[in-house]
Amino acid sequence: MNAKAEARDSRFDLLKWVVVAALVVVGVVGNQYFSSEPILYRVLGLLVLAVVAVFAALQTSKGRLFFGLLKEARVEIRKVVWPTRQETMQTTLIVVAVVLVMALLLWGLDSLLGWLVSWIVG
């Protein structure tokens, strides 16, 4: 892109973000204003406003960058090697055992220090 196109995009980006903010405000105020209406209609209205707001936000340069980040994150999540059920259970049992041992050690230390302080104080 050339400099004029980037400047024009950034100028319109501000307007697009104002539209997104206005849609959010309309959703919040409208939900409060129509509180006597059935929840189904309010939820459908909020969903429509949310879709329009997301579409408007994706038209901005930061919105396109964010969408690209989401796509890259999805690719990275697919690369993760998730633990098996057995590995998860073993790790969980190790954590529980360490927590119990530490709890017993701290309880013993607390009891010892409490006994020591009461012996000193009288």
Image (tube, rainbow, N blue to C red):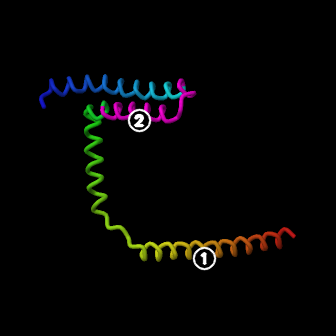
Residues 105 and 112: in front is 105
Q: Which residue is mark 2?
A: 47
Total labels: the figure holds 2
Which secondary structure lies at badge 1? helix
Q: CA distance from mark 2 to mark 1?
A: 50 Å
Q: Quadrant of the N terminus?
A: top left
Mark 2 and mark 1 residues within 8 Å of each other at the beta carbon? no
Q: Is residue 51 magenta?
A: yes
Which secondary structure lies at badge 2? helix
Residue 72 location in percent, x, y? 26, 51
Residue 64 location in percent, x, y? 25, 38
Q: Which residue is mark 1?
A: 101
Residue at image point 28% right, 35% down: 58
Q: Is residue 54 magenta?
A: yes
Quarter of the figure with residue 27: top left
Which residues fall within the magenta stretch?
33-55
Residue at image point 45% right, 24% down: 26
